[in-house]
Image (tube, helix red, strand yellow):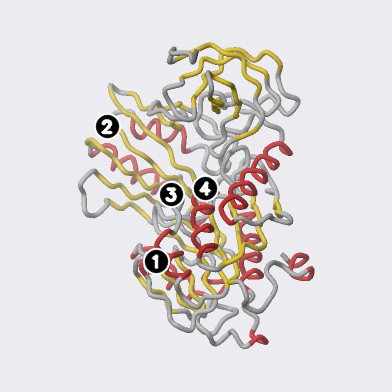
Amino acid sequence: MPSTRRSERLRLAITSIAPGGQGVAHIERGNERRAVFVARAAPGDLLEAQVDFEQRPARGALLKLLEPSALRVDAPCPHAERCGGCDLMHLNHDAQLDAHRRIVSELLERATGGALSSVGVHAAPSSTRYRTRARLAVLASRGRAVVGYRRAASRHIEGVATCLVLDARLEPMLVLLQELFARESGEGEVSLALGHGDKPVLDVHWRGELTGAFYAALERHVGSGALAGGEVWLSGAREPARVGDARAVTLGADGEPLIVPAGGFAQAHPALNGELGRTVLALAELDPNRGEASRPTVELFAGSGNFTVLLARHTESLVAVESDARAANAARANLAARGLRARVVEGDADAFDLPAATRTVILDPPRGGASGAVHRVAASKVRRVVYVSCDATTLARDAETLARGGFALGRVELFEMFPHTSHVEIVAVLERVGSKGAVGLSANERSNA
């Protein structure tokens, strides 16, 4: 008879890592084979967990590690077990890479019905002190502020004064923010980045009241050089309060400084961004000798122009589409600073009408993917799609749409942009079946990338 208990203490053998970073075990329960997800578990672990069968998949809370996996390491960060950030820090480096490779391969192969011959992996040059961007949670009340990261699947904030993966130029902000918000009331989020002069910039979104003392302190920190600037958005406000210059400055995919609006998106690991950009360019195959340079090349979800400033050097007709007005303006400014030209369109990339002559589309959507855009691409005469994604699940969903529309999956490259986490940056090229040209990188392109 099937068990009717909603929660049971069970012994589990972990076999793999699921998208999202949790360990996976399988058990027979009644006449059904159930998957159980356990956070902070490693393939090869034998453990005891309290399993909640009300959820699908079932969720297990680790109670006791009976036989630790050989893939386990002691996490070097004291917050690793509680912080919701580095969810794979308990795995050794090779195990992290293997988990990413397996997850991406299985999802894409299942979605497109084709086998991947290989998946390239680009390791990060550093797995610590690499993040030049971070989003922190803040809770302030009764003369005290808690600043840190939310625990996994929880609203609870794990307060931190140090962060092993945060750039050393940003880490002092953890203490500064505690002092800045200590006498305030409310809660919110603060995005950290590096701005002009490699000084930190803040983008604050706050629910509650902020006193005049807060703004005065913010101005003092900007005046002293501790900060380059900050923007403060109060709940319901149409415009932020601005102090100093809160724009971020990072390295674009072309290796030159890229200006990003306060709170805007940019890759968190600049040291790997150039390699990412060179790979995107190679996979786009914008070769003027093939007669394609004069045809429109479309970049969707262009942001502040990270790839735009690289692509514009290799095509005569580039259209970059971005919905956020400030990011679109930043893309125009970044192009102008380099003496480059491209048509930057402020609009919804998911609803953009592709020019009829378009043969190549580059997409870099947010985590939710590009469901509208890929349906339009599938219905067009586009031959080649280079899809950049930070989420394997939504990439697989969109790749399935393209496969149904006549595209075949080719080369896939992984970039370890977020070491110690379950997140990975993915570049996949899909080519319309029957179109000319080989999918993937040539040997020369691979060596140059």
**Mark 2 closeness class: few <14, some 14–19, many ≥20 residues within 10 Å:** some
Residue at left offset 66%, top offset 85%: 290
Report the front residue among 206 and 290.
290
Disc number placed over residue 32 in the picture, else none: none
Q: Earlier in the sequence, mark 1 or mark 3?
A: 3
Query: Circle 2 sits on which residue?
Result: 186
Q: Earlier in the sequence, mark 3 or mark 4?
A: 3
Question: Is residue 255 visible from the viewing direction of this image?
Answer: no
Tag in front: 1 or 3: 1
Report the front residue among 228 and 352.
352
Residue 313: x %, y % from top left? 58, 78
**Mark 4 closeness class: few <14, some 14–19, many ≥20 residues within 10 Å:** many
Tag in front: 3 or 4: 4
Disc number placed over residue 393 in the picture, else none: 4
- Alpha-carbon distance for marks 1 and 4? 20 Å
Label 4 secondary element = helix
- Amino acid type, callout 2: Gly
Label 1 secondary element = helix
- Amino acid type, callout 3: Val
Query: Circle 1 sits on which residue?
Result: 349
